[in-house]
Structures are given as C-alpha cells and as structure tokens.
Amino acid sequence: MSKRTNVNITTEEAKKQDNIITELAYHIKDKGLTFYIGTFGCQMNALDSEKIEGILVKIGYIKTENEKEADFLIYNTCCVRENAELKIYGKLGALKHRKKKNPNFMIALCGCMMQQDIVLETLKKSYKFVDIIFGTFNIYKLPELLQARIETGEHIIDIWETHEDIVEDLPSIRKHEFKSCVNIMYGCNNFCTYCIVPYVRGRERSRQMEDIYLQVKNLVAEGVKEIMLLGQNVNSYGKNLEDGATFAHLLEKIATIEGLKRIRFMTSHPKDFSDELIECITKHDNICNSIHLPFQSGSTSILKQMNRGYTKEDYLALVNKIKKSIPNVTLTTDIIVGFPGETDKDFSDTIDVVKQVKYLSAFTFIYSKRTGTPAATMENQIDEKTIKVRFNELVNTVDNISSEFMHAQIGQEYEVLLEDTSKNDLDMLSGRTDTGILVHVKAPINFIGEFVKVKIISAKTHYLIAERR
Ligand code: 5AD
Ligand code: SF4
C-alpha cells in the first residue's frame, strides 16, 4: 500500500491518464466487457461515480444495470454511518465465488470507506480477492491503476492521505442531459464531533471561480438547465483562495450565465450563512428558493458537544431571517437522533425546532458511532430502545408537517422541471418546482428535461399530483 501526501498534479496528469485510456481501449474495446457501479452515500459520491463511468466507457467497457452479471464491479463506498459499511462487507462476502465462474471478473472498491486504516486492514486480511482499491483523492488515477492490475496481475491498493490539487478535466458521463452537479469545493474543516468526513475527504479546497464558471457555461451550452453546486460546506467556499472570493460572489457570477434556468446548492452550514448570500438569492430569479440547512440537534448543549458553532436560538434567528427575506422559500435539513448524552429535554428541543421551522422534508439519522471521531469515546451513549422511540417520534413529526404543507398546495400553480418517469405510475413523469417540491404529472416521456406549467390537484405526504395547464 502506498500512502502519499502533497503530490503535485498538473493538467499534464490528466493528459497522462488520457493516454493510458487510449492504450487500455486498444485491448479492451471489442471484448464486450460490462461494468456496474454501485454508488453509496451522498451526492459527492454520485458525482465521483459519473467520473468513473466516464473513464470506463472511454476505455471501452459497456455499462450494465445488472450487478449480478457485470464483468467489472465497482463499489463507490460511504462511511458516514456504520450501516453503509456493513452493506459493502455483505456484498463482498457474496462475490468471492464469482471469480471462478467468470475469469474476466474484477472488483474495485473506492470512496470514503477506503480512506480508513481499519477498513484497509480488514480488506487485506479477509477480502484478498478485491482487485483494485483506491480512495477519494485519486479517482482520476483509475486508468493507471487498472492498467497496473491488468499488466502485473497484482492486486492494487492506492490510498492517499491528502491532496492539494484538483484534477477535473477527465471524461465524465452525466446521468441527466438537462441537469448536472458541479463540485465547487472538496473536503471539510468543521470537525463536527460525530462526523468522519473531515478524516476521509481531507481539508477544504475550493476550486478557482473561473474554472467553475467555465465548466457551468460549457454545461449550459450542452443543454443543461439546472445546476447543483456541491460542497460539504458551500458557505465557506473561497476561504483558501487568495482572491477573496466568497460563495455569494461565485453565485453572482454563475447566475449571469444565459440559459441557466435553475441554480441549487448544498450543503449549507448554518454558522457560515451570510446576509450577502441571502441578498444574492433574492436578487436572482434563477437561484432556487430552497435551502438545505442541516441543524442536527435542537439542543444548544448537544450542539456544543457536536462542535456545530451555533445555538438553537442562532439557528432559529437565521431561519427567520431567511424566511422573511426570501418569499416562499422551502427549507430541508439533516437531523441526528441519539447523540451521546442526549436527554429527553434535548430531544424535545429538536422536535421544537422541527415544529417551528416546518421543513419541506428532513433526512433523519440515528447517531452512528464512528471510530476515530471524538463522539465515539464520549460517555452516555444512548441505548437503542430510547433512540428508536425518539426516532419514530421525529419521523412522525416531520411527516405530519410535510403532509400539512403538501395538502395546502392543492389548487396552486407551479412551473415544474420534469426529470424522470414516476416510479409508481409509468404514465406519469416526476419533476420539481423551483422550491424543490416533488410533483407527479401526466405527460409524454419526451417531456423529460422540459419545464411545464401545472396545477396541483391532490397531495400525499411527500409529493404532489398535478395536471398540465
Ligand atoms: N451518525 C449519524 N448521522 C451522521 N451524519 C454524519 N455523521 C453521522 C453519524 N456519525 C449525518 C449528518 C450529516 C449527514 C450527511 O449525515 O446529519 O449532515
Ligand atoms: Fe461532517 Fe460537519 Fe463537515 Fe458536515 S460540516 S461534513 S457534518 S464535519
């Protein structure tokens, strides 16, 4: 295994990988080999998987949705909660015998889970049959790692501890033609005490504003109408740049791109949400009026233990300011239940915040102990039974509020960007309003990627049904 730091990467590196892609393509193209990427975790991983897909398709692998038949299986892993890791070990256990059946069969593992020493040790000891292991900092090296695996026959493990530079100009395949995610920064400096992300994704590194601007401009020229700007903490964009750029500056610049209809961004940290940003959102029609603003816990003392950098009152004051300044804004959030030391009173503060803010939806998580984080060794870990009771109460509260909000939309008119066929009804397409509300509407399949005007005719807890106007 090689653990490296501070490797300097230039666009030369991208060219080098591209040459390797050409060499690999010569051997792989006409063989009809298929690949499947299993993506776990957040949108960052989803975007990384698009890059992996871009590389593999260029090499000549054929994408398949059939995980069971693929010649090359790639799992892009997550380690934010223990469950995500257990799923990967479960999947690997079932794969050992597939190599005997298919001599071409290969497995690659990448993503956040691979950045932990304890995981690498387990893989080396008990899952020796995995062909390639790489991490979050060297995805662009995949062509080189694949070539090494094929030419040497050795199992390849290449994990880096950190990375200063950012390589973006490799092939990537977007899931949708009309919308795209764009990374604006990598890593996180916040060290919330429960969270493993800063350990596996490294310190904050912002991309240059001009690079992001040009990327978005090109995407729009290719037909993209909606952009999601991604970062673990977008509000601290620019802090490591020398030109004094802020996230609001970046948004201002991107909002001027002609033809870009919708700009979304996530995730916002409440402690860095500036007035300048609120003003910028109100000023530009194409910046969506929906904000993902995780609060994690409503209890000021738990927030302190979590190292979140705000109190319950700070958070509620920020929400009030946002609601006052941005009409019809919708808020979504992340909430953790059962952080060490959480009392009934702490939990009732969480419920209180949910009731006051009235989120459109919330991602609710049971606290998961992550080895290496400060919270893992805190006293008063909460028992499972108490957590379950609290979790159910939280989910019910969130759902009741969401349902109330959805039913209040009946009769309203919205513009919806249609994104996909509906999962439940093949005659329906599903899309989102500017404010992020999920709407199902009857429309022909070729309307995917188009904006339509709709009137809401009925509501469920998490979505609306509409008819076209
Ligand atoms: N346990 C449970 N939830 C967690 N999250 C991050 N770390 C943990 C953990 N150890 C949640 C937070 C974060 C979201 C992406 O995942 O709510 O906002
Ligand atoms: Fe994790 Fe906190 Fe960083 Fe979000 S802000 S990635 S919860 S450490």
Image (cartoon, helix red, strand yellow):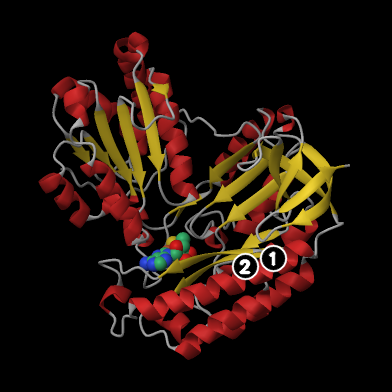
Q: Residue furthest left?
A: 125
Quadrant of the drawing holding the C terminus: top right
Q: Point out residue 282 in the picture as x, y percentages from the top left corner.
A: 78, 60
The number of callouts visible is: 2
Task: List x then y, in percent, for residue 409.
Answer: 80, 60
Q: Quadrant of ligand 1?
A: bottom left
Seen in the picture, residue 310 relative to 214 is either above or below; the reply is: below
User: Residue 215 in the image: x percent, y percent?
Assistant: 58, 36
In which image quadrant can residue 379 be found?
A: bottom left
Secondary structure under tag 1 reads helix
Residue 46 lies left or right of residue 250; in this view the side is left
The circle drawn on residue 150 is none
Place of residue 205 in the rendered image (x, y in percent of width and height, measured from the top left): 44, 53
Of the pair 463 and 208, the residue shown nearer to us: 463
- Reading the image, the residue beneath label 1 is 403
Give the image quarter of residue 223.
top right
Tell me if mark 2 has few (under 14), some (14-19) or many (20+) residues whose alpha carbon lies within 10 angstroms of its own: some
Horizontal side of 69 relative to 263 (left or right) equals left
Q: Is residue 22 above or below residue 340?
A: above
Residue at 37% x, 85% y is: 341
Q: Which residue, given by chain and number where applicable, does mark 2 sit on?
A: 399
Q: Mark 1: few, some, or many residues within 10 Å (few <14, many ≥20)?
A: some
As rendered, which of 37 and 44 lies closer to the eye? 37
Q: Amino acid at mark 2?
A: Asp
Q: Is residue 458 left or right of residue 244?
A: right
Tell me the quarter of the image containing the N terminus.
top left
**Local SS, label 2:** helix
Q: Which residue type does callout 1 highlight? A: Ser
Horizontally, residue 192 falls left or right of residue 150, namely right
Q: From where the camera sits, is residue 265 visible?
A: yes
Q: Give the CA distance from mark 2 to mark 1.
A: 6 Å
